[in-house]
Image (cartoon, grey):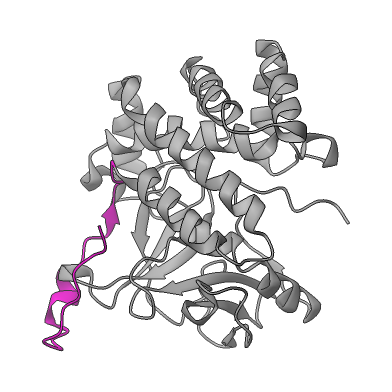
């Protein structure tokens, strides 16, 4: 459900805004609804509807397994040294993520045909070593065009696995993470940032992890890649991309210092925004910003941008 809007105008609660917010149990169900909403009349409608199917499959897979327990020594190091306990590129993944992938593929395959079904058939036919190598490339950002058809499904399964694990963590441990530009739970870059409405988070900006969905607070008008404030400016699409376009609620926050950008979405413009879904629905903005010489600082694991 959309977060209630606070209308009394007070900003006192900003001081009480949590530093870290763990992924919610309804994350993927709400994302699926947003993808479906955005697909209406959109030039990328078919892809957005496919991602709605993927998100619904994620929502079904998430509660079926319990997160593997982390060792006390790992949690202690995380607490003492500000290290993300699930650091994605070094974390010893359990085979559980491949079970999530198989379930997601089965759910999506039942409602698709043609090239999508063929891609899923090829993906589930891979052996464990090939799947683990593909997962490594997705997490490292080194997937190539030959992997393109598999990336959204592998990314979706990894999201379920890591969000399940992140949700079981103590947010107080994560709040000690001392690298504000990466996720305090899994050390991945954010997919976008969101300015929230309602409650203690009203008006606060949170970076949203591209992998596990954890959110962490970062002051507004500050580059989410280099933390500079000087040279930060915003770009937006002028034309709507469909009847349910989120263009008015999405901007690109670009930094002249490091020449990077990341999108920022505003709940006060549209309370239903989802950072991952609205990011994919505004790929035209990426083209615009790229043409001006800025490079994207965080991935969307549900899309392979290609090497062209």
Give how far across and how far down residue 268 sits, in percent: 33, 79
Give how far across and how far down residue 107 sits, in percent: 51, 27
Left-right relation of 76 to 245: left
Residue pushed farthest right? 308
Residue 10 part of the magenta segment = yes
Give how far across and how far down residue 273 sits, in percent: 41, 66
Q: Is residue 133 above or below residue 277?
A: above
Residue 265 part of the magenta segment = no
> Which stretch appears magenta?
1-25
Residue drawn at point x = 31 percent, y = 27 percent = 63
252 and 43: which one is in front? 43
Q: Is residue 180 above or below residue 86?
A: below
Residue drawn at point x = 56 percent, y = 63 percent = 279
41 and 195: which one is in front? 41
Left-right relation of 254 to 117: left
Residue 197 seen in the current view: yes
On the image, which quarter does residue 263 sit in?
Answer: bottom right
The secondary structure making up most of the magenta span is loop
Q: Is residue 283 above or below residue 56?
A: below
Residue 67 seen in the current view: no
Q: Quadrant of the C terminus?
A: bottom right
164 and 176: which one is in front? 164
Residue drawn at point x = 70 percent, y = 10 percent = 127
Q: Number of numbered discs present?
A: 0
Left-right relation of 84 to 252: left
Q: Quadrant of the N terminus?
A: bottom left
Residue drawn at point x = 60 percent, y = 80 percent = 240
């Amino acid at each position: 459900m959309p977060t209630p809007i606070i209308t009394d105008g007070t900003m006192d609660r900003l001081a009480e805004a949590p530093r870290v917010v763990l992924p919610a149990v309804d994350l993927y169900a709400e994302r699926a609804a947003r993808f479906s909403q955005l697909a209406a009349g959109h030039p990328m409608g078919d892809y957005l509807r496919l991602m709605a199917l993927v998100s619904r499959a994620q929502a079904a897979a998430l509660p079926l397994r319990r997160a593997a327990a982390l060792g006390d020594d790992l949690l202690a190091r995380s607490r003492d040294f500000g290290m993300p306990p699930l650091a994605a590129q070094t974390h010893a993944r359990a085979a559980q993520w491949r079970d999530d992938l198989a379930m997601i593929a089965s759910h999506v395959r039942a409602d698709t045909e043609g090239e999508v079904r063929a891609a899923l058939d090829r993906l589930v036919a891979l052996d464990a070593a090939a799947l683990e190598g593909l997962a490594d490339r997705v997490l490292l950002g080194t997937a190539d065009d030959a992997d393109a058809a598999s990336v959204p499904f592998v990314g979706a399964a990894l999201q379920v696995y890591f969000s399940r694990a992140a949700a079981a963590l103590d947010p107080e441990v994560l709040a000690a993470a001392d690298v504000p530009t990466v996720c305090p739970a899994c050390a991945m870059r954010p997919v976008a940032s969101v300015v929230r409405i309602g409650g203690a988070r009203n008006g606060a900006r949170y970076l949203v992890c591209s992998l596990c969905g954890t959110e962490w607070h970062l002051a507004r008008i500050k580059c989410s890649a280099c933390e500079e404030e000087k040279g930060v400016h915003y770009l937006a699409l002028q034309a709507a991309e469909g009847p349910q376009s989120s263009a008015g609620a999405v901007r690109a926050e670009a930094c002249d210092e490091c020449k990077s950008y990341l999108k920022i979405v505003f709940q006060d413009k549209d309370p239903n925004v989802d950072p991952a879904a609205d990011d994919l629905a505004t790929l035209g903005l990426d083209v615009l910003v790229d043409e001006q010489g800025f490079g994207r600082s965080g991935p969307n694991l549900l899309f392979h941008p290609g090497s062209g």
